[in-house]
Amino acid sequence: MHIAAQHQPSQIQLNQDGNLKHFLTIEGLSKSNLTQILDTAQSFFDDNNNLITTPLLEGRTVMNLFFENSTRTRTTFEAAAKRLSANVLNIDIARSSTSKGETLRDTLWNLEAMAADIFVVRHSASGAAHFIAETVCPNVAIINAGDGRHAHPTQAMLDMLTIRRESNKPFSELSVAIIGDIKHSRVARSNIAALQTLGCSDIRVIGPRTLLPVAFDDYSQDVRLFTDMDAGVKDCDVIIALRIQNERIDSPALSSQQEFYKLYGLNEERLALAKPNAIVMHPGPMNRGVEIASSIADGAQSVILKQVTNGIAVRMAVLALSMQGQLQHQGFADTLSL
């Protein structure tokens, strides 16, 4: 399912000054927009690399509206909002008024009337967050926490922050491999867009043809396709293993999980083909022994748990920047001091 909207996200997620007032997708954002998110996220670490708590959003209300199940993303958004001193409400959509026949618009308008400042939205329909930002609640900052197969922009930015913090090279000099179910992955789509915007020109997509997009050529010459895992990971600086999206696969695309691991699972032999200091990433939750061996997931080159911590910092940044952008858009003088 796809929810249509009238304008491109880039036209509605930025205010007149070019700053975020919603965060819907990576597409349409500039390198300076993404760098601002990364720099702001980095500012939320202290000198010992611990996350700080700040009163930036004190008195503001963040509502988590998850129409699709998630534990990690919702929890890290809640942790991020609380570290910004915001009030946080987790709305149980399954038991909300929409289950009693109320329209989505009416539910959202009622939540907006409860003095909501930010909606964090996850939905199974592509374009849902865009639709809400444009037609339902344009004066509430809308953060896309994942919509269908379309986008997962905060996951992409936490991955970019992890790469920036853990790699010794600028994005322009990195070789990045993304392995697995590209066809059904909003994470892959957002990561590719972010890497391209930040200047990475060696992006490798690896997987069986059944799990690759039909219109792969749309990604441009920066992205190379590999169906041979060994050739794809050779001399890479960053390897991102994706979860098999079983819940989004419309028909059988794999002969078996065992066959996938045999051909595309990240194990010690394949990691040895990458550069010696290559980092290993996974957006989670992991299927050990399907996408990645436990020895790699828990090994010295894995930065998977660091991704989780960086995710809180990035979501703090996006919440704060979007709130500031909304205040600027609505003409308030007392914007946040970031």
Image (cartoon, helix red, strand yellow):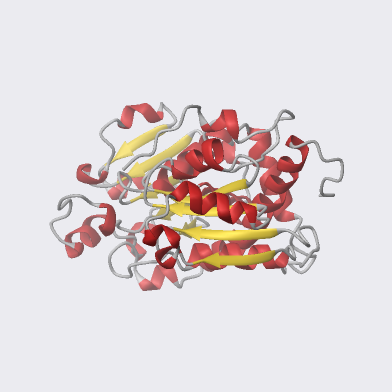
Find residue 332 and report its horizontal and vertical position in percent: 82, 40
- For the view shown, which residue lies furthest in the front direction? 101
**Residue shown at the point (22%, 55%) measured from the top left:** 263
Whether residue 55 is situated above or below residue 127 in the rendered picture: below
Asked if residue 140 shows in the view, the reply is: yes
Tell how many labels.
0
Near-viewer residue (247 or 95): 95
Near-viewer residue (61 or 70): 61
Asked if residue 237 shows in the view, the reply is: no
Near-viewer residue (193 or 205): 193
Tell me which corner region of the image, top left, top right, bottom left or bottom right, holds residue 258. bottom left
Left or right of residue 274, residue 31 in this image: right
Near-viewer residue (233 or 250): 250
Find residue 282 and report its horizontal and vertical position in percent: 44, 60
Left or right of residue 220, residue 180 in this image: left
Q: In the rendered view of the protein, which quadrant contains the N terminus?
A: top left
Tell me which corner region of the image, top left, top right, bottom left or bottom right, holds residue 271. bottom left
**Residue shown at the point (73%, 50%) measured from the top left:** 40
Find residue 112 and report its horizontal and vertical position in percent: 61, 52
Tell me which corner region of the image, top left, top right, bottom left or bottom right, holds residue 46. bottom right
**Residue shown at the point (65%, 63%) measured from the top left:** 80
Whether residue 43 is situated above or below residue 29 in the rendered picture: below
